[in-house]
Image: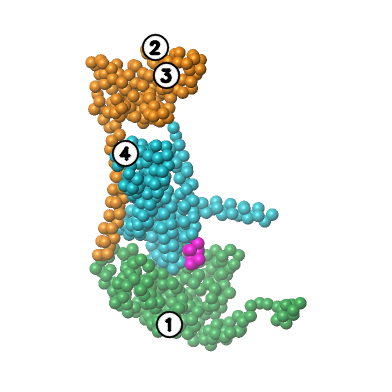
Amino acid sequence: MHDTEQKQAQLIEVNNLTFGYGQRLIFENISLQIPKGKVTVIMGPSGCGKSTMLKFFGGSLTPHSGEVIFDGINIPDLKREKLFELRKRMGMMFQSNALLTDINVFENVAFPLREHTDLPDSLIHHLVLLKLEMVGLRGARDLMPAELSGGMARRVALARAIALDPDLVMYDEPFTGLDPISMGVAVKLIKELNEALGTTSVVVTHDVPEGAGIADYIYLLGGGTVVGHGAPADMMHSSNEQVNQFMNGLPDGPVAFHYPAEAIGDDLLDIRQ
Amino acid sequence: MQQKRGIDFIVGLFVLGGLAALVFLALRVGNLSSASVNNAYHLYAEFDNIGGLKLKAPVTMAGVNIGRVTDVKIDKEFYTAVVELSIDANYDNLPEDTSAAILTSGLLGAQYVGLEPGAEETYLKQGDKIEITQSSLVLENLISTFVTSGAGGGSAAQSNSNADEFE
Amino acid sequence: MNWIADVGAKALSIVSNLGLAGRFFAILAGASLRALGRFSLVIKQLYAVGVLTLLIILVSGLFVGMVLGLQGYYTLVSFGAESSLGLVVALSLTRELGPVLSALLFAGRAGSALTAEIGLMKATQQLDAMEMMATDPVPMVIAPRFLAGLIALPLLSAIFTAVGVIGGYLIGVQQLGLDSGVYWSAMQEGVDFYADIINGVIKSMVFGLIVTFIAVYQGYFAIPTSEGVSRATTRTVVNASLSVLGLDYVLTALMFGEV
């Protein structure tokens, strides 16, 4: 019912996607939708393939089967040139920030503008300063990436991701490795930028409070498929045990605390022999 | 931008330094300045045997280097070696009866072509052939001459006869 | 019987690596032509690859020339042939030591730095980020470094040779008292511009191509972890040095083998 209501308002639709490395399947027949103009948070335990999902959105991985439809275009079908054309409508913030280390903050943010627009230098200058102002780092424009703290680097990466005013901004683990203040800043920025720019945001994270705090909609992945999805409030009080365990951080539940092993009594006796 | 200008400048200096090193090698170390015979004319000489004469071996007159060996071929009719000599155009007054000999520098050194000027009033021109030649001394022939004719009966030079008979 | 399978697997992986390298080379060659249009990127890399390698080249060239002067003199003087010292020094340097030693030093200094830099860019997702910003990293990052290596090594090699000849002069003439005119004239008599100097330059061009290609290839295909990058760096130095020495034999046989 949910799907049919919002059919018009999906920016990305993943349909029956299957993918794996060698024998190991990461996704099996997974389907999900990213609504336009909203913040969608994709959560899940480490290694469940959250970040891999972003690679399908960006077209850097091709699924074994299934569709990834971005605004009516099936991404896996695209040739490299068309894909690059489409990527100009996307911005991505990497977990490691991925700032270009041999140019300064200003040039990092200016990079997509210089590469993809023919704007005069003075206009690029204005645009870059505006983006840096949004993340509060206008004063840091001349610093090199190596001189930035983790939180500042992430903000620069954010400014760069939105430099071309993309339709879609993807955040890969934006809260990992930040101190509490920087984390608060990141949460605030993602939320504000989404509202101010009217873009669609996809956030991949395993930080439940922060993720739930900014999400309009949450997808919980696990075991190669969607475990549960819904609005943050619904997810926190889900009756599904697996969802409940993850959202509330319970040490034991459907995801067992113990790695599969024989009964401990047998194991100990075994050693004695 | 200031910094960028600096890097451009240093890289420019580096490239200039590399090119300067190449020029140094070409002029000071190599023979581009002296020995490349730009303005040269060619003479030919026939020898029965050129021994170990190599391409680019010097051509000298009175011990002075005046050219180089630029080609060595076999004359298909007479089975003699035809040597092309490239002579500096400054020395354009070699008499027509100039003779050529293949000589050895030092006891075991490289072989070269020595020219001995004649007395004619007319001079050799581009494409002319030097008529009087003396072949290289081949050590084995020299020794066998000594062995067969006793101590110095027939001279080695005669046994290595010149090309005159063929003309 | 397991080792048969191992040998087979190893052979297969070598062949497919060669195929990958070939494909990468074709892409890189095309990208390099395009990168010529953005020459400021190449200049930046020429600084990193060329200028920063200059010091080690100058120092090594000088010392190698001095050693040649010393060794050559003592060897030649026992045959009474010390007048050929200039020729011995110059021929060894122009034909062999200049191109080969500067290529080995270049592999150690610039090649390893190239691999580490590109590998780190990959490990820190900078190359992925460029891809996601719809910019192909090969013409942007790899090709300028490749071109810079191609340009820098022949220049460095010429500088090495020139400094070496001067080093031989310092020892032979200034120190051991050989006549300066004899030193230079023996050299000019015996060193041919085309056969020796140009062939030496061609050698160093080939070495520049192979060393830089190995360096950027190892960097670009490094496993994007700190361990992967450090291993790729080691592989660059080892593979590049072996390739230089092996190719040197082939080139020498081709160039100086006739007659």
User: Residue at point 36% right, 31% down?
Assistant: B56
Mark 1 Cα within 10 Å, few/some/many (few <14, many 20+)? few
Name the image quarter holding the C terminus of chain A.
bottom right
Q: Are marks 2 and 3 in contact (CB under 8 Å)?
A: no
Within 10 angstroms of label 4, few (less than 14), some, or many (20 or more) residues?
some
* Element type at mark 1: loop
Residue B71 drawn above or below residue C24: above
Q: Which mark is residue B165?
A: 2
Q: Which tint is chain A?
A: green
Seen at 72% across and 80% down, the residue is: A268
Q: Magenta residues?
A: C223-232
- The three-letter code of the residue at mark 2 reads Glu
Say if the magenta span includes residue C99.
Answer: no
The residue beneath circle 3 is B48
Report if residue C139 is visible in the image. no
- Identify residue for label 1: A179
Kindly report which numbered mark, 2 or 4, lies closer to the viewer in this rendering: 4
Does label 4 lie on the same chain as label 1?
no
**Which chain did the image draw in orange?**
B
Q: Amino acid at mark 1?
A: Asp
Chain ID of residue with mark 4: C
In the image, A120 versus B66, the foreground residue is: B66
> Could you tell me the amino acid type at mark 3?
Asp
